[in-house]
Structures are given as structure tokens and as C-alpha cells.
Amino acid sequence: MARTSAGKNLADDLEWAGRSEYWLNYREPKRGRQKKFKYREPLILCGHGVRINVHRNTLVIRPGLTHYPQTREEIRFFPGDGNLPDRIIILDGDGGITFDALNWMVQQKIIFAQLNYRGRINFICSDGRRNPRPELIRWQLSIRDTDAARTIQRQIIRAKLIASVETISSIFPNLPSTEIGIARISREINKLHKLPKSAPVGRLLGLEGAAAAEYFRAWHASQLKWSQLSRRPIPPSWQYIGSRQMAWKNDGNNARHPINAMLNYGYGMLISQMQTEIVSAGYDPAIGFTHGRRSNPIPLVYDLIEPLRPVVDRKILEFALSRTFTPGDFTINNYGGCRLNPQLAKAVTKQVTGLETGAVVRNFCSH
């Protein structure tokens, strides 16, 4: 006998709650010697009804609810605590925060940001005293469309291609597609070395695009692990890792595949970290080397995240290929867009915290 609509909804709700509880209690396996203090790590929140306020000069945080039943936590931070987070990130949540809480976070040098369900940054609030330095802004403006800017562009692309080789070598070892990809990406790196300093940006981006095509082609043979598919089907394309370019309505932030949805969150975290580092160092994120400002208010951020994109890919792929998912980890909207269970999104974003964004800023903006 076919299940009624109410019965299907109840089963889906129970599956959603079960997977939410699984990812809520998920802990990364311990590697190496544990530090006494986890200093200045980000705090990631999700769910409905997030509340952040100040009580007796302490920051009180009540994370949101993502399923039923769920016990609401309460987190309390004291001023000057060595374990204060460096950032508080809200993932596709709703709720409220008081002005007192925002002031408290500014005083304790905590950055506050929100990412939407596509992994796109809605806003970032940080210490207002982190102002750009005039001499650095003048330098950014002075090198635009010069050989100096093209040298930086070349270095960024080279670093990205080298990291791409490291990622596919690490994640997909001993595959024919990996060997072919490495050979072809290495060929593009050699072409990059031979280009004259005055080569236009278009030629640099052409080499990068050719290498990217080979890089993503190496992903396609890998299969994701699934269970409980008899309860609810998934699209056949979800069985394997597909193309990063597979998107909805020509918008890469509307993922149609679980891996793409995870990567969007990873890139969103990377962008928020990089923007913070750029502003802290005194540069203007609105003045870039390669990306323009036509539809991008922070082109320098998008320039400097390029060498770290393959690093984010590596961390997300390691996470995804070592887990077994169920249909309850994802939802599909009416347009085919894939959304992560909020607790899974929280686990995913934790994979990409602590990236060396500061080192990238120092390497490519030193002069």
C-alpha cells in the first residue's frame, strides 16, 4: 500500500531530524597532539532563532534550531578570554543581535558575518578602526594596467595551477585522468613561464582556463557513497562528482549537485577570511589586479583567493569522499537547486577555517 502524503512528510521530517542530529554531534577525528587552547577559532552558527546579546558584560549566544526535538545550547564568552573566536559566522540563519553585542565584538576584535544558503556573503561587520593605509592605496592605483600588475597576475595564476596539481594528485591518485591532467596543467605552467612580461591579461586567463578544464575533468570518475536510497531517491548525477560548472540559471552560486553546494560554502568562508585579511593589512579590496568592478565590489579579494581555491577543493573533497551521505542531508528546490542540511553546512565550513589567507596577502601585495 502506498504511503499517504502525511506519512511521507513525517518520514522525511524524521530523516531530516536524524541527519541534523548526526551532523550536530559530528566531530573531526583528532590528528596529532592536541593543543591546550584553540585560540581564536571561528564560531559557526546556523538554524532558526539565533540570539546574540550581552548580559553582565559577557556575550551570550543561543544557536538556532534546525530540527525537532533539539536542545537549545547557550554559549557565554567573557572579555579577554583566550578562547574567544576570531569570527562569528551565521550560515543561512535567522534571529537577532543587539547593538550592545555588536559593540562588544568590536572591542574584542571579533568579526561578525553572515553567509546565505548559496554560500554567498550577505555582510561582514568588523572593527571600524581597520582603515586602509593611504600609501598602500596609492600603490594599488599606481600599478593598475602595468607590467608590475601583470607580474602579480602571473604569480597568482602559477600558484593556483601548482596547487591544482597538488589537489588532484592527493585526492585522485593513480588514476589515468589524474596523470593526464597533471601533464596538461604542467604544460600550461610552462607556457606561462615563456610568456613575455607585457603579455595581455587575456592570454594569462586563457592559459588558466585551459588548465582549469583539465583540473575539473580529473574529478569526474569519483563516486560518492550513499545509504538509505530506498527511502527517497536522488538524481542519478549525484552518484558521482560532476562538473563544477553544472549550475542553475547560469548562476554558479545556485548549485545543482551536493559537491557544488559544499564548495560554495567553502568559497564563501574563504572570501570572508580574505576580505578581513586585506582590510586588516591596510589595502583597499575594491582595487584589484585582474577582476574588474563592474559586478564585483571587492575584486582584490577575488584576485587573491585564486591560489587557495584548489586548497578549499581539496579539503571539501577529502571530507565528502570519506563520508556516507543520505538523502536527508540535502533538499532540492523546484528549480533543481541543491541545499545542504544546516548542520551539514556547519560541518563543511569547519573544514576550511584557518587557511593561510594572511600569507597570500603578504606574498602578492609586497612591494
Image (tube, grey):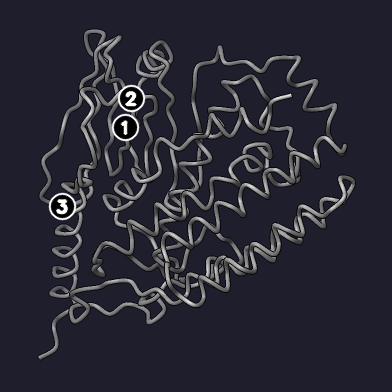
Q: Which quadrant, please, contains the N terminus?
A: bottom left
Dot 2 alpha-carbon crowd within 10 angstroms: few under 14, some 14 to 19, many 20 or more: many
Dot 1 alpha-carbon crowd within 10 angstroms: few under 14, some 14 to 19, many 20 or more: some
Q: Seen in the image, is 179 located left or right of residue 88?
A: right
Q: CA distance from mark 3 to mark 2?
A: 24 Å
Specify the farthest residue to the right.
Answer: 198
Precedes in sequence: disc 3 or disc 1: 3
Tell me what residue is drawn at x 21 percent, y 21 percent.
76
* Mark 3: amino acid: Glu
Please state the horizontal and vertical placement of residue 189, each as a whole percent of the image.
69, 57
Please say if 287 is above or below 18.
above
Precedes in sequence: disc 1 or disc 2: 1
- Name which quarter of the figure residue 12 lies in: bottom left
- Name which quarter of the figure residue 303 lies in: top right
Q: Are marks 1 and 2 in contact (CB under 8 Å)?
A: yes
Name the foreground residue: 54 vs 317. Answer: 317
List the residue tagged with mark 2. 85
* Mark 1: amino acid: Leu
Q: Which quadrant, please, contains the C terminus?
A: top right
Precedes in sequence: disc 3 or disc 2: 3
Dot 3 alpha-carbon crowd within 10 angstroms: few under 14, some 14 to 19, many 20 or more: some
Q: CA distance from mark 1 to mark 2?
A: 6 Å
The disc placed on residue 43 is 1
Q: Are marks 3 and 2 in contact (CB under 8 Å)?
A: no
Name the foreground residue: 13 vs 303. Answer: 303
What element does badge 3 sit on? Answer: helix
List the residue tagged with mark 3. 21
